């Protein structure tokens, strides 16, 4: 039994999945570590993996000339980084930058795609769970866009 | 009810648009008693009154701190007052944070923007009687790093007290190493037992609404969450009608409400 | 069935010609007498010094968005129902200076505002307005914090009710249980009787003050025929209501239908002018305004009426919570007929019909409630069958 299985089974992303699926996923997983300031990936690079943060914080950034690197959002413990591996064109949309020293579980996207081709139920389950991650991320970003603490006098006339 | 004269003792800049100023009664030796979460109607003669939350130590005090954000004529006038200036004060008004109800439980304090101001007296009370509570967490969301209220004080709390303190911003600025994202994103990771938690939430209504939703996702029932509402206030004593929210007068039935009592009303547009 | 207006006590009869003596007694006791006068096409409350100033021979015609005064055949003083103003205009006045503020060095001095006026006697208070005064008593005197300005004016006020002998086109006090009989809160109650060429008022005391007045007036006992005539007049009024309002389960209905499309339908006609709130005898909302007088080194804080129809009423930084007319009309109606119950234990409406009469768009609170009830019943009925 892969030593990562019990940890993976407890992650919110995978909680409640069948043991045989956890086994398949664990076979595509590895522990990784990044130093503060290190990039997990850069915009435009092929997206062939995703991470679940175990400890630390990672920033999603866009670099705009004249403005520098802008942090859109940070992702912390137990949260998922990266969904571009799931959806064509499988390309990172942002820079992924470790803000602090970060330990994470890395999941090999190509490996999971291969296993999903033979086990359609696994593929379906992954898609369903990632859809939830994406929806919650979208919801949070929408609230961010609302600029709730800003001064909006005169806008609604 | 007439305003009583109070003198400005201190007027300190918190952020580019927010100041905390401390008042004391002009009457020598007089003291003022209030509870965490209450507010006063501060009167700038010739200009008008504004409802301002008390943000300092609660109890029977000589000095009363108020944190004011400049959003209109009255608040801008108040912000320009200097040490020694006199203004009028009516209060204390409103239902306070039920801090004693949280004893023996985990406490989650969630603030957004200027909403941290009326939460601060409650937080201080909790931290100063730390042993009476379970796990204590402060989750605070500000617009950007320069909008963080009581930034230095938050750092001292981090060092001095046994509490989980997380500060996030909606927009980062260069050099910011903390979390970026709305304050609701801090909730899934926060350490509390949903079965025995009391949550005090304060900030813009939309932020409170989504915060309580996120808390419910983690199993905290509406009857264990308290929010602080805001409405137009003129008299502060339930006689002028302006602050009505459904059947409630926010000035006297609130501003602190147990969430289950107002949940159905918050979903109605323009109520 | 309305009882004999005198209730358990024997009624008295006051001849029309003795009204001036009653007024004289009131003046002698230091009262300013407020009474109805016909002025600029309406019956309004004004200071009255003689019975000749009362609106003899005037009658009114009221419908949604319509008010007309016309000459009637006889010399009746009270052959009209209600005008646009009510005793509220004196007891909870439209404008009042709360205090003056003066800077003395770096200190702040507060000086008294308007003193309360001389005590007032109100002659001609309709049952609906009596009920409205009781409602305002509950709001302004019955809570934890009371209004000292209202207290000063109310405590000394003498209320002489005059029961309606006919109902108006927009009246529905019978539906609200507030009239046409004046049951409580009055010092004196009178009913005008004109029969066989005689013109008198059948009356009774409602308080010790009222009883003292009647005793001093030396009014004789009313005959059985006179008492019957008075009772018949009130009965006639009770059965002649121009409108009805079904109050059963109304607060619950209003709480359930906050998002009903009917509100949008009303909003298309409503101008948010606030006339309804301004003529309503129970609306109590006020706001404050500050004025500076730099030459005198003083400022003044004034309290004045406000209405939830005003867009600024619900302003908090950034904008108004109720910016649409839909939301403002809904607030007014659901408060008056719904949440008032939660706040004060009764309906906020006394069925005087003023809001219907004085609405330039002719919006009718009884019709809107009926429409809401009917449409909601249909919706709930169809859901039950689904």
Image: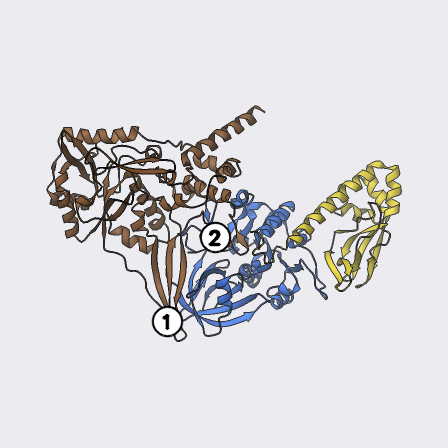
Chain colours: A yellow, B blue, C brown
Left or right position of A107 against B193: right
- State the residue in front, A79 or A45: A45
Left or right position of B217 against C35: right
Q: Which residue is mark 2?
A: C312
**Label 1: how many Cα within 10 Å (few below 14, some 14–19, many 20+):** few
Residue B169, percent across and down?
66, 59
Q: Which residue is mark 1?
A: C295
**Label 2: how many Cα within 10 Å (few below 14, some 14–19, many 20+):** some
Answer yes or no: is residue B244 visible.
yes
Quarter of the image for the N terminus of chain B: give it.
bottom left
**Who comes first in sequence, dot 2 or dot 1?**
1
Residue B100, percent across and down?
51, 55
> What chain does badge 1 belong to?
C
Answer yes or no: is residue A27 visible.
no
Q: Relative to residue C264, is residue C295 depicted above or below?
A: below
Seen as rendered, the residue at the extreme top is: C385
Q: Examine the image and state in which quarter residue C188 appears.
A: top left
Q: Residue at x 32, y 62 (%)?
A: C113
Residue C78, percent across and down?
23, 38
């Amino acid at each position: 039994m892969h030593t990562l299985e019990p940890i993976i089974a407890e992650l919110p992303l995978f909680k409640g999945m069948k043991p045989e699926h956890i086994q398949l996923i664990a076979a595509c997983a590895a522990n990784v570590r990044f130093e503060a300031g290190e990039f997990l990936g850069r915009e435009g690079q092929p997206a062939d993996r995703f991470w679940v943060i175990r400890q630390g914080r990672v920033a999603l950034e866009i670099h705009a000339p004249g403005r520098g690197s802008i942090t859109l959002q940070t992702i912390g413990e137990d949260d998922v980084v990266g969904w571009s591996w799931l959806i064509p064109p499988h390309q990172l949309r942002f820079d992924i930058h470790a803000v602090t020293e970060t330990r994470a579980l890395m999941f090999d996207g190509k490996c999971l795609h291969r296993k999903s081709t033979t086990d359609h139920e696994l593929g379906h389950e992954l898609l369903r769970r990632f859809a939830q991650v994406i929806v919650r991320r979208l919801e949070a970003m929408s609230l961010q866009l609302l600029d709730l603490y800003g001064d909006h006098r005169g806008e609604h006339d | 009810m007439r305003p009583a004269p109070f003198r400005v003792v201190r007027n300190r800049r918190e952020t580019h648009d927010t100041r905390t100023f401390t008042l004391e009664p002009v009457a020598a030796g007089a003291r003022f008693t209030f509870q965490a979460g209450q507010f006063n109607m501060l009167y700038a003669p010739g200009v008008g009154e504004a409802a301002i939350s008390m943000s300092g130590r609660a109890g029977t005090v000589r000095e009363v701190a108020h944190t004011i954000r400049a959003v209109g004529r009255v608040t801008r006038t108040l912000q320009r007052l200097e040490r020694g200036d006199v203004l009028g004060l009516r209060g204390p008004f409103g239902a306070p944070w039920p801090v004693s109800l949280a004893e023996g439980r985990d406490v989650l304090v969630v603030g957004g923007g200027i909403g941290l101001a009326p939460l601060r007296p409650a937080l201080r009370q909790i931290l100063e009687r730390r042993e009476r509570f379970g796990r204590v967490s402060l989750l605070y969301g500000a617009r950007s790093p320069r909008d963080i209220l009581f930034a230095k004080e938050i750092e001292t709390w981090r060092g001095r007290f046994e509490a989980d303190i997380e500060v996030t911003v909606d927009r980062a600025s260069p050099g910011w190493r903390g979390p970026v994202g709305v304050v609701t994103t801090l909730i899934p990771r926060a350490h509390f037992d949903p079965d025995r938690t009391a949550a005090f939430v304060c900030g813009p209504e939309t932020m409170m609404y989504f915060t309580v939703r996120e808390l419910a996702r983690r199993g905290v029932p509406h009857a264990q969450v308290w929010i602080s509402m805001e409405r137009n206030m003129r008299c502060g004593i339930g006689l002028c009608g302006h602050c009505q929210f459904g059947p409630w007068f926010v000035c006297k039935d609130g501003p602190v409400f147990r969430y289950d009592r107002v949940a159905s009303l918050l979903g109605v547009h323009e109520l | 069935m309305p009882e004999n207006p005198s209730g358990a006590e024997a009624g008295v009869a006051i001849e029309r010609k003795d009204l001036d003596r009653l007024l004289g007694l009131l003046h002698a006791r230091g009262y300013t007498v407020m009474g109805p006068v016909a002025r600029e096409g309406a019956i309004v409350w004004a200071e009255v010094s003689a019975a000749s100033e009362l609106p003899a021979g005037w009658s009114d015609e009221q419908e949604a968005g319509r008010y007309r005064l016309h000459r009637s055949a006889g010399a009746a003083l009270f052959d009209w129902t209600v005008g646009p103003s009510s005793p509220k205009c004196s007891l909870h006045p439209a404008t009042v200076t709360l205090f003056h503020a003066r800077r003395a060095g770096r200190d702040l001095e507060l000086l008294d505002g308007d003193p309360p006026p001389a005590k007032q006697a109100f002659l001609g208070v309709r049952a609906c307005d009596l009920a409205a005064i009781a409602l305002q008593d509950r709001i302004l005197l019955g809570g934890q914090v009371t209004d000292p300005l209202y207290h000063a004016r109310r405590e000394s006020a003498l209320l002489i009710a005059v029961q309606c002998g006919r109902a108006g086109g927009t009246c529905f006090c019978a539906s609200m249980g507030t009239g046409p009989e004046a049951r409580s809160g009055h010092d004196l109650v009178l009913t005008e009787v004109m029969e066989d060429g005689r013109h008198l008022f059948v009356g009774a005391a409602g308080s010790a003050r009222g009883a003292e007045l009647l005793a001093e007036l030396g009014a004789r006992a009313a005959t059985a025929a006179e008492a019957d005539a008075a009772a018949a007049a009130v009965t006639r009024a009770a059965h002649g209501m121009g409108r009805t309002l079904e109050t059963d389960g109304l607060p619950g209905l209003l709480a359930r239908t906050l998002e009903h499309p009917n509100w949008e339908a009303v909003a298309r006609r409503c101008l948010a002018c606030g006339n309804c709130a301004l003529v309503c005898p129970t609306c109590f909302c006020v706001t404050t305004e500050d004025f500076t007088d730099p030459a005198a080194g003083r400022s003044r804080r004034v309290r004045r009426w406000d209405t939830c129809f005003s867009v600024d009423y619900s302003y908090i930084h950034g904008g108004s919570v109720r910016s649409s007319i839909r939301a403002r009309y809904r607030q007014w109606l659901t408060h008056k007929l719904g949440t008032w119950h939660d706040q004060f234990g009764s309906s906020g409406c006394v069925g005087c019909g003023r809001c219907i009469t004085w609405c330039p768009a002719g919006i009718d609170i009884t019709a809107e409630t009926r429409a809401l009830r009917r449409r909601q019943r249909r919706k709930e009925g169809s859901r039950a069958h689904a």
